[in-house]
Image (cartoon, helix red, strand yellow):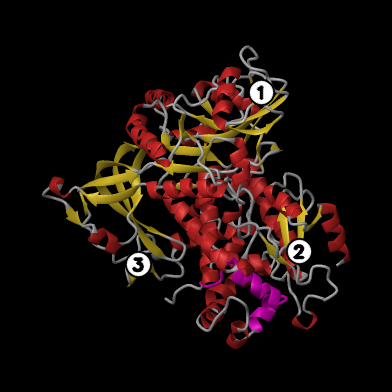
Amino acid sequence: MPAPTDAARIEELRTLLHRANRAYYVESAPFMADSEFDALLAELAALEARHPELSDPNSPTQRVGGEPVDGFVQVAHRVPMMSVDNTYSIEDLRAWWERCERALGRPFQAVTDPKVDGVAISLRYEAGRLVQAATRGDGTSGDDVTHNVRAIHAVPLVLSGEHAEVPAVLEVRGEIYMPSASFERINAERRAAGEPEFMNARNSTAGTLKSLDPAVVRARGLSFVAHGAGESSGTTAAGRPVERYSQFLAVLRALGVPTSPRSRTCRSADECVAEIESFAAARAELDFAVDGMVVKVDSFADQRELGVTAKSPRWAVAFKYPAERRPTVLERIDWEVGKGGTLTPRAIMAPVVIAGTKVQHASLHNIDEIHRKDIRVGDTVVVEKAGEIIPQVVEVAAAARPAGAVPVEPPSACPSCGEPVTKEGPKLFCTNGACPAQFRERLKWFVGRDQMDIDGLGEKIVDALVDAGLVRGFADVFTLDPAKVAALASETETKAGTRVRRKIGDKVAASIAAGADAARGRGLARVLAALGIRHLGAATAKSLARAYPDLDALLAASVEALQEIRDIGEVTAPSIHADLHSHAMQSAFRALRGAGVSLASTTFVAASVAPAADSPFAGKTVVLTGELETMDRRAATERLESLGAKVSGSVSKKTDLVIAGPGAGSKLAKARELGIEVWDEAALAAALSRA
Ligand SMILES: [Zn+2]
């Protein structure tokens, strides 16, 4: 296979990181290590910096946390909830310290705070009373979880005015977490009741906060610790305004808000490193999971001077401790079939608790990796995990190898369809185009949020539909009989965070039907990207849909014509052309058309009338920030692009226009600072209707 182009790699990384983000924040089922996520995000940011023309306001680099889930009211954060940059090395931490010192031009003092592994929350107090609790969400708005947070004893409902003056408005930022004792007690109760155990304290915290029933929250024994401020009318100590984070923490404690008893003030990088090292040993004794240490510049004036980037404050950094390791026994290896036919080995191990999580599965990547590490079934393997990290098999405890340990042979047949397996480098493939396991994974991709975005069709429901034979091709999801869907059983997560099998039911079946109806009109670009054609990701699909008015026109195009399109080269054009004309795709297209799915482009730009020069957006660089209330952000982006605008994710001197909705934060501030024209959504809507 050729080296992927930068554009394809950007596409691949965005998709992967969006998925990882959703798995982590929305589904509470992470599949990627923090360190791996951070590394991929850094790679993406570097590629995007090199290719500003490929910027996208929906790129994972453009946001801070997760997307809120349905069922809760959205709350805009008056001050954005930023995330702190992570580092895994002491040298990076020292480099950060030096950068701050250089920028400030003087020595400074910092505060170290243990990084509690929980769910970030913003608590708003007005006249000393808790009026709102909101999750971080995407950093500009989150879910209103006030009803649940009130059930957490550690969160004061009324601030104490006994030892400090209560500010008119105070937003406390902090972390909701599940103490290890609560986690273990709940699991012991569940074991006794014959119910499945929770895997992880952080995920059960997130799941608990999403519960609609505060009684569940109360029973879970969640806790809270504060670590920052949002909007505030000003806190005072002894009648004088608070000027330092360390003072602010003292005021919070005086007001009855829990803060970390382990906060320390450091005057140098050396002091800071010493604190991190001494805490490394102490943290294992704590009653809750701590995965690192946050270091913040103490003086608020210094913080303002250092400022923020689009994503995180320059005045703070989080040092993360290395992963925890434990031995366990490798019981067997399963080979899982992916959407492209790749067979990935998965280790099934005796359960072991690492970093507060029960671990029994780990990806072994590929057969060469298994042989390189000489992993055999029956071996004692060393597994690594830290916080939300995905477990990894680091090495084999060779001395503990039993006589009967079995070397791993690659399978010669696909475990799903039984067809022969081919090997390309270290990778094994099932090349059977009709392989049921591959279709299942491709279908999950097809209905996914960034592709056809069919509401209600989660992975478990897709499994149930395929198992029952109700869906045999992509188009079948558009013609499902709701009564048959409702009667199926599917695995689902209860509000308590455990998995059970339940009937899908009329309500979900109806929402799937409505979701499919809504998805029919997504247009050619989305359909092409959803089909999982090699070398045809979302960016390429968009380019094709700009060049051709509909599928028929695209199918009539020659390989040479395709080669002229942005993102498509000499190598990919023949491959895309061949796949579009393959028997499988031809029948998929026919079936989709038959199911009423639009194969017309919504963004076609005829070359002869290329973005009209009189379009107010031709050649302009536009940034969308904050929330759009009447328009879909993706639709607005596509419309602007079709009018010749370049839609960018970040504000710079090259930006011509910023569209700011409610909740717009640092980008709007920067636009004002640079004197860039700013419109609201109504002005954009008016201009689009004229264009
Ligand atoms: Zn197969």
Quadrant of the rendering where the C terminus is positioned: bottom right
Q: Earlier in the sequence, mark 3 or mark 1?
A: 1
- Residue type at mark 3? Lys
Q: Nearer the viewer, residue 322 or 424?
A: 322
**Of the image marks 1 and 2, the number of the one nearer the N terminus:** 1
Q: Secondary structure at mark 1?
A: strand
User: Tag 2's secondary structure?
Assistant: loop
Which residue corresponds to mark 1? Answer: 240
Q: Seen from this angle, which residue lies furthest top? A: 162
Q: Is residue 312 left or right of residue 630?
A: left
Residue 535 in magenta stretch: yes
How many residues crowd around disc 3 within 10 Å: few (fewer than 14), some, or many (20 or more)?
Answer: some
Image x and y of residue 679, in percent = 81, 55
| Residue 533 visible to the viewer | no
What residue is shown with label 3? 427
C-alpha gap between disc 1 and disc 2? 43 Å
Query: For the stretch drawn in magenta, what is the main secondary structure?
Result: helix
Q: Type of residue at label 2?
A: Asp
The disc placed on residue 468 is none
Q: Which residue is mark 2?
A: 656
Residue 627, position as x, y percentages in the image = 73, 48
How crowded is the residue under tag 1: few (<14 C-alpha within 10 Å), some, or many (20+)? Answer: few
Pointer 2 residue Cβ closer than 8 Å to ligand 1: no
- Pointers 3 and 1 in contact (C-beta within 8 Å): no
Image point (48%, 38%), residue name? 295
User: Contact, CB < 8 Å: mark 1 with mark 2?
Assistant: no
Disc 2 crowd, CA 10 A, few/some/many (<14, 14-19, 20+): many
Q: Secondary structure at mark 3?
A: strand
Label 1 or label 2, whichever lies nearer to me, is: 1
Q: Which residues are magenta?
A: 533-556
Residue at 77% over, 57% down: 675
Amino acid tagged 1: Arg
